[in-house]
Image (tube, rainbow, N blue to C red):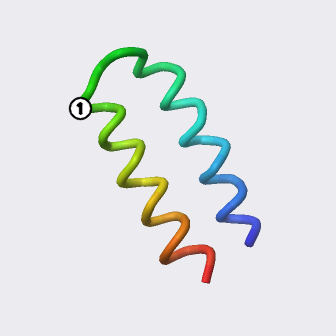
Amino acid sequence: MAEYKRNKKKIKQYREKSGRNKLLLWLCNVMEWINEHCIKN
């Protein structure tokens, strides 16, 4: 669960840095999905 929370923070930082870059935002969404469905469980 600690890894999940740490990843969530990192993803939030990446999302803020990416701005309007659609590829980076898409990558953030993918990382978020993996974090939610694979690491959380």
Q: Quadrant of residue 33?
A: bottom left
Q: Residue furthest top?
A: 20
Residue appearing at x 69%, y 53% in the figure: 6
On screen, residue 4 versus residue 32, left or right, reads: right
Residue 30: x and y in percent read 36, 54
In the displayed structure, would residue 7 be above or below residue 23? below
The crowding category of the residue bearing disc 1, from other C-alpha atoms within 10 Å (few below 14, some 14 to 19, many at least 20), is: few
Residue 37: x and y in percent read 50, 74
In the displayed structure, would residue 24 be above or below residue 2? above
Residue appearing at x 67%, y 64% in the figure: 3
Q: Quadrant of residue 36?
A: bottom right
Q: Residue furthest right?
A: 2
Residue appearing at x 49%, y 77% in the figure: 38
On screen, residue 8 versus residue 32, left or right, reads: right
**Image quadrant containing the N terminus:** bottom right
In the displayed structure, would residue 2 be above or below residue 9? below
Q: Residue furthest bottom?
A: 41
On screen, residue 26 versus residue 3, left or right, reads: left
Residue hosting label 1: 23
In the displayed structure, would residue 11 be above or below residue 17? below
**Image quadrant containing the C terminus:** bottom right
SS label for mark 1 = helix
Residue appearing at x 35%, y 15% in the figure: 20
Say how many tags the image has: 1
Residue 27: x and y in percent read 32, 43
On screen, residue 5 versus residue 30, left or right, reads: right
Q: Amino acid at mark 1?
A: Leu
